[in-house]
Amino acid sequence: MSHTTPEASGLDPAMLRDQLFDLWNRKDLQMLHLAALQGFSKLSEPLEALLTILESCPGKQKGRSHTLGHHILMEFQTWIKEHPQVNLSSVSEQQAVALQRRALNLLTDTQPNFVDSLINIYQLNSLDPAILRLHITGLHALNCYKEAATLSIKLNLQEELNMEEMCVPLIVQDKMSVAVSFVSGYSHLEERLVKLLDSWCHPSFCVAELNSQFPRLNLTKQRMEQIQPKMLTKHVLRLMEKFKIDKGLCPNALHKRRLDSLRFLMYKRFVDKGMTEENWIDHVQYVVADDLELQIHLVEMLVRYSCLRKASQWSLRYNIPRYRLPYGVWETQQSLPRALQQISLSDTAETEWESAQSHCEKFYQVPLTKDKVHFVDTPEALERCQSIVLKEGVVVGVDMEWQPTFGCISTQQVALIQLAVSDRVFLVDLCARRFCEHPETIRFIRSLFSQQSVLKLGYGMAGDLKCLLATWPQLQEDPLKMEGMLDLLSIHKKIQHSALSRTHNGPKEVLVGEDCAEKGLSLLVQQVLGRPLDKTEQMSNWEKRPLRISQIRYAVADAYCLLEVYSVVSRNPASFGLPDDLRSISSSQSEMSRDKKLKEKKGKQTKQTLEKEECQGAQRVSPSRSDPEKGVLYGEKPSEDSPPLPPQQLRVVCDNMLQGLGRYLRCLGVDVVMLENTDDHRVAAKACNSDQYVAVPRDDMVGMLKKKGLLPDQDNTDLMHQEEEKHDDILTPKLPRYALQCRWASLSGLDPDTLTFPGGAPIQLHTVPPTLLPRIPLFYICTRCGKVFWEGSHFGRVLSMFQEVLHISDEDNESAAVPITAAQQN
């Protein structure tokens, strides 16, 4: 197509705009394309005319790509490529600046193509920085914070602007990624952003300070949630590693993460009981380090979770000043014999390779003797390992261990690599002196993972490979070639999916037994081999040498079980719902991409079906007659005239964005688990879901607290005197009328010495403030998890709020209780 030169004629820009607008309304985009190209060639001043058209273009919608203005600009961008003579150098300098200013005023659109095109056509990067800064200030005044930051990045204005003024509004509006893009590439700005976020993690930081600094922000409750310590800590630590910033500049976030880690360790050791004493001590010392405040927190937590003696031992270890000690610790210190003043391990270190009979009956056991386990920590041992592991046709189970850092460092270095073959296991010790740095070690790793003829079995190998890259940075410069890999996680997902498709009752066949606590590889081993893995040593200190027998046994089992699972599954894959060729099951990027496209294609078709199933979900959870407890998850399809489902039979998980909803649902009797910001979604699988409680009168609670050392004797005596005078009527405790769906257990099932229920759950007495005792006559304890509940000060308001839904009368509101029977009292 031939074009006349712009000077040949002078088409009125308004006429061209009206013509294009008419075609746009008729949705004739092909004719619009032709009319635009022809029209641009007839304009006497194309650059000025384009601005005139865009400024008066109707239907402008910020951020939308399907607008007339956006189409016109894209068509002009195409046209100008064939007319390079149309540029700012063809007009006077005064005219060029005037055109640039007009173009700048159009840059409130968030479409990258739109913004980039205007910047390129009108060479806005060449404008006076003072003019550009003034425009950015104007966008800020209009609360267009994202547009201002995006434009600043495109015009390279970051160093001309105030980082805090640009980034704080973005962070508050949950646009952290834009703030990060604003500072990226400018080391001093990166450092300032991270230090700013870290300062907000300090305990004394008050959000009100931001209101005074940025009064236009209008900090709502939802926006304030973006600057809570938990969320900020995640951002600080992520950016600290991304920008390679010194840890010393982030003291508050690191302290917060270590404090959260300490709380987690206390839970794992004293509530979940999933960690040995020795592992717990190793990790506590790593987390607390030389931070006095964390050391004090540790002692305070030990008073609540354990006992005064253990708290006293740790306070002596860290030489904590007397005036910072919790009540009773200093007195206990003075009464301790010298032999008990040091911390000792309560667990007896194992020296035998063979496990106890009870352990063998409960957990998977490796069918190898100790002499079949070989440590590889020298070049000579590595050569012997290679001669066996790298043989053609060998199947190798691969696993790795590293030191847990509880989020203080996101990527750890590998400490131990386990390589299992049919008759032995090699433990490649990367903590051995300089062995990790030996050229032969790295060469062996490259050979192992790249050899197609050696089948490598793993489980969730993405994490292992990430740690490998952190261990050897040279593997990033010269990427590791991956051949002959089979991730059993992909096979496990296929097994789970196949089991789901074969049942109409949800994940009943997937879980092995009711309330299955296993997950990941341990669950797969249980499903295929009959017994789960013992994960007690999973969170060991894997950098400490020598390794304990229990650690070695765990490391060997984690790798060898892969061989046995693969052997069983490959003999009869159809029985597990798998294809004959297990290697065809891949989690490759191409397959994931294909699955994603397939899901998108079916999305519209399945959306209505899913919504229908979700709406029917409340009906499906009606209890079955044969097993009322199981029916909540696997109930039969009800008839159309099924009665409404009581709230007590619903089980709901709310993430951190729905905690307000979760609290209201709990008030209505719904079983709700509320996840914290840092919780993994799999935490939802550990919901207690128990409806059985024990009612504990105040005097029994006082006795329990005193037994655990959580209630000083003097306070106990004073309290009992007060209660004898004021609460003689509590001799017959009462149960709440609003909780008729609950099942009430007897206190006789409680172990009087350990204060644990038959299922092993201890009463969480550390959560009961002694100051509550004068006001609360009756406590309720869950028999499955040991949590303690009571009617708080807001209880009357809650009853009033839900009076109609819970069918509570005014009389109930005043005294919502019924007497406990004699059997319940006993």
Image: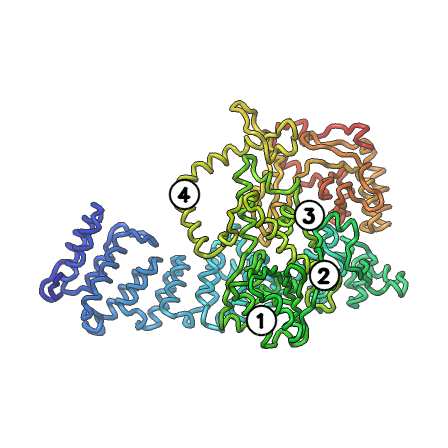
Residue drawn at 34 percent across, 54 percent down:
63
Of the residues tagged 2 and 4, which is closer to the observer? 2
Nearer the observer: mark 2 or 3; the answer is 3
Q: Residue furthest top?
A: 641
Return the residue nearer the eye: 405 or 67: 405
> Helix, strand or loop at disc 1?
helix
Q: What's the mark number on residue 444?
A: 1
Specify whether 718 is left or right of 739.
Answer: right
* SS type, badge 3: loop
Identify the residue at horizontal 72%, vertical 56% (top origin): 275
Mark toward the start of the polypeptide (4 vs 3): 3
Please say if the residues under marks 4 and 3 sit with CB atoms less than 8 Å apart.
no
Proximity of marks 2 and 3: CB atoms separated by less than 8 Å: no
Percent of width and height locating residue 502:
54, 38
Residue labelled with disc 3: 531
Q: Which of marks 2 and 3 is nearer the N terminus?
A: 3
**Image quadrant occupied by the C terminus:** top right
**What's the residue type where badge 1 is placed?**
Phe
**Which comes sooner in the sequence, label 1 or label 4?**
1
Residue beneath disc 2? 551
Q: Residue furthest front?
A: 392
Q: How crowded is mark 2: few (under 14 residues within 10 Å), some or many (20 or more)?
A: some
Quarter in which the N terminus is drawn: bottom left
Q: Is residue 413 left or right of residue 297?
A: left
